Image: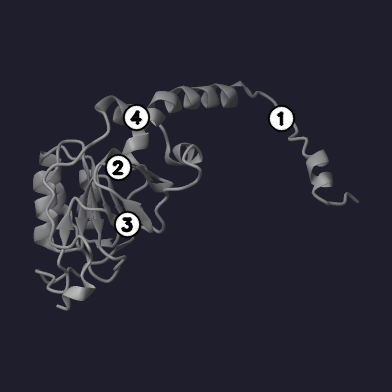
């Protein structure tokens, strides 16, 4: 391997990371991704990564794995704590799987919250039966031949997943709309305001009992639209 082409963090295994407060994680787990993203200025949404099954939800601190290598991912899981989310920067490869139900079963035994894979999984039926929150780009029966010699990975370093930079300890929230990343340093402050804001939104929506016009005529006229 030409070491001049290595990722700046390749070869690092970071054992200890900082995480958001447990109360903050619990509070944000009750909010949906689109609502949170509105309060993040629309930034932090991963692209092309979706839940393996409708209704899957995940919320927890990120434990990051650079590259699809099996041993590196296992190290990340060993270092994870209950409630963590495994986030794998697998380069967006959809032709080879780097996740499956065997790994998921081990993660369940450790009470991990779920997995987000910027790549593909296999064993989709078994993962659905386990109801393990799994967010991926694709599904394929073809697995990598391990070790992935072209990859020299890392654990708990900044990675890019779904086009978004993820730092270890950032809060990962996923649901039917996709996956978002909340910077760790913002999680607790958001948790202090979003549950109340979400409840206010729910009350407002439930209060509507008849159609009220949006009354946007004036705005459209000011923007140059013509009514005929």
| Secondary element type, mark 1 | loop
Side of 118 relative to 86 (left or right): right
What quarter of the picture does the N terminus occupy? bottom left
Tell me whether circle 4 and circle 2 mark residues in contact (CB < 8 Å): no
Side of 203 relative to 66 (left or right): right
Circle 2 packing at 10 Å, graded few (<14), some (14-19), many (20+), is: many
**For mark 3, what is the residue?**
161
Separation of disc 2 and disc 3 at Cα?
12 Å
**For mark 2, what is the residue?**
170
Q: In the image shown, does 135 or 26 lie closer to the viewer?
A: 26
**For mark 1, what is the residue?**
211
Q: Residue at x 14, y 67 (%)?
A: 152
**Above or below: residue 218 compared with residue 141:** above
**Which is in the foreground here, disc 2 or disc 3?**
2
Side of 125 relative to 39 (left or right): left
Write down the quadrant of residue 60 in the picture. Answer: top left
**Which is in the foreground here, disc 1 or disc 4?**
4
Specify which label sits upstream in the sequence, 2 or 3. 3
Separation of disc 1 and disc 4 at Cα?
37 Å
Separation of disc 4 and disc 2 at Cα?
11 Å
Q: In the image shown, does 35 or 210 lie closer to the viewer?
A: 35
Give the image location of residue 187, x and y in percent: 35, 34
**Above or below: residue 7 compared with residue 195:** below
Specify which label sits upstream in the sequence, 2 or 1. 2
Separation of disc 3 and disc 4 at Cα?
23 Å
**For mark 4, what is the residue?**
188
């Amino acid at each position: 391997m030409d070491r001049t082409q290595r990722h700046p963090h390749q070869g690092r295994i970071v054992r200890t990371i900082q995480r958001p407060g447990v109360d903050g994680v619990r509070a944000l787990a009750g909010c949906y991704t689109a609502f949170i993203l509105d309060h993040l200025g629309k930034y932090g949404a991963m692209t092309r990564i979706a839940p393996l099954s409708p209704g899957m939800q995940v919320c927890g601190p990120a434990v990051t794995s650079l590259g699809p290598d099996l041993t590196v991912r296992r190290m990340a899981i060993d270092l994870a704590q209950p409630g963590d989310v495994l986030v794998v920067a697998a380069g967006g490869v959809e032709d080879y799987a780097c996740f499956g139900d065997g790994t998921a079963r081990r993660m369940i035994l450790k009470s991990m919250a779920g997995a987000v894979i910027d790549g593909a999984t296999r064993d989709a039926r078994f993962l659905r039966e386990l109801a393990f929150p799994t967010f991926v780009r694709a599904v394929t029966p073809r697995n990598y031949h391990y070790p992935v010699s072209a990859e020299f990975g890392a654990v708990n370093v900044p990675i890019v997943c779904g086009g978004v930079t993820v730092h270890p300890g950032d809060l990962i929230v996923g649901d039917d709309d996709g996956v978002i990343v909340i910077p760790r340093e913002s999680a607790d402050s958001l948790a202090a305001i979003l549950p109340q804001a979400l409840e206010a939104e729910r009350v407002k929506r439930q209060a509507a009992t008849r159609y009220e016009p949006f009354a946007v005529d004036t705005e459209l006229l000011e923007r140059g639209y013509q009514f005929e």
